[in-house]
Amino acid sequence: MSIIRFDDVWKVYTNNVKAINGMSVQFEKGEFVYIVGPSGAGKSTFIRLMYREEKATKGEIIVNNVKLSGMKEKEIPALRRKIGVIFQDFKLLPSLTVYENVAFALEVIEENPSKIKQRVMEVLDLVKIKSKAKFLPSELSGGEQQRVAIARAVVNRPDVLIADEPTGNLDPDTAWSIMDILENVNGLGTTVIMATHNKEIVNTLKRRVIAIEGGRIVRDEARGNYGYEV
Ligand code: ADP
Ligand code: ADP
């Protein structure tokens, strides 16, 4: 059973831009997938459709056996706990500490406070930022902020981690350290779907590559290359 499935999905924005033009694709549990393609190809739209930040105009998207077309607004938070998301610009809450940014995202159902703390510290340990738990985002480097964002995205143990250009604002060494962490997260069984322009990473850490152009999938390879000049 696929963790995410697109069945002939179309997305036309209200300004009449046709961003996704008939996409059918599926992702399996535990896969690591790069989404590549030129700017404006539809990569971000493709990703935003998965966590219901955008609604498909036509077609069906199924996440964890749930059809997104019939999803009610009040069901969206539950979906977002099954799908962690990270962005190029981190999007941490600036007035909260590292610890608080992660704890805030934790879905807490009658867990005792020491359990909650244990889970948050465990995930801060996973991304190697535990020693800075009391720091504010403004006191961290870009790479450290992205690690906190990853911690926040995976604290609820989602089935899927979606990353939209996660290394876009980072220098090469830092980008590699983020990849190291994403590989660890994937190694724990989480499906990772990552839109990227980083040719070196795609060509070195060989994974499934899906290339999008003009809102269509033009290439889907099990151990693919980046395939564009940069
Ligand atoms: P990529 O991530 O590959 O750069 P996007 O998904 O951001 O591509 O954009 C695909 C197309 O949809 C582009 O033509 C873009 O201008 C348009 N687009 C993206 N977001 C919106 C939006 N919120 N409203 C209208 N058009 C949009
Ligand atoms: P350890 O006891 O193994 O060093 P802790 O779980 O006590 O690990 O915490 C590690 C770091 O996180 C310490 O700096 C600690 O003060 C900080 N920390 C723990 N809980 C919180 C919290 N609720 N808010 C802010 N920082 C915290």
Image (spheres, rainbow, N blue to C red):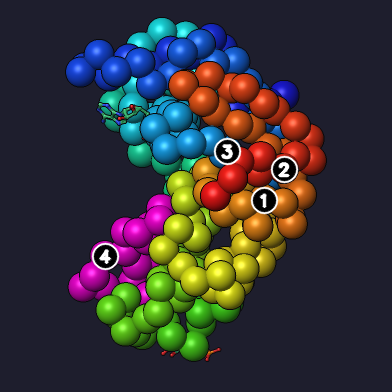
Name the N-terminal-most of marks 4 and 3.
3
Where is residue 145 drawn, in percent x and y?
Answer: 41, 71
The reply, left or right, for residue 199 in relation to residue 203 is: left
Where does label 4 land, which residue?
93
Where is residue 33 drawn, in percent x and y?
Answer: 65, 41
Marks counted in the figure total 4
Q: Secondary structure under badge 3?
A: strand
Of labels 3 and 2, the one closer to you? 2
Give the residue type that dot 3 points to.
Ile
Q: Which mark is residue 35?
A: 3
Compute the Cα span from label 1 to label 4.
30 Å
Give the camera-side residue of 27 and 126: 27
Give the residue type that dot 2 points to.
Asn
Residue 106 shows in this picture: no
Where does label 2 land, which residue?
225
Query: In the image, which residues are magenta?
Result: 87-105
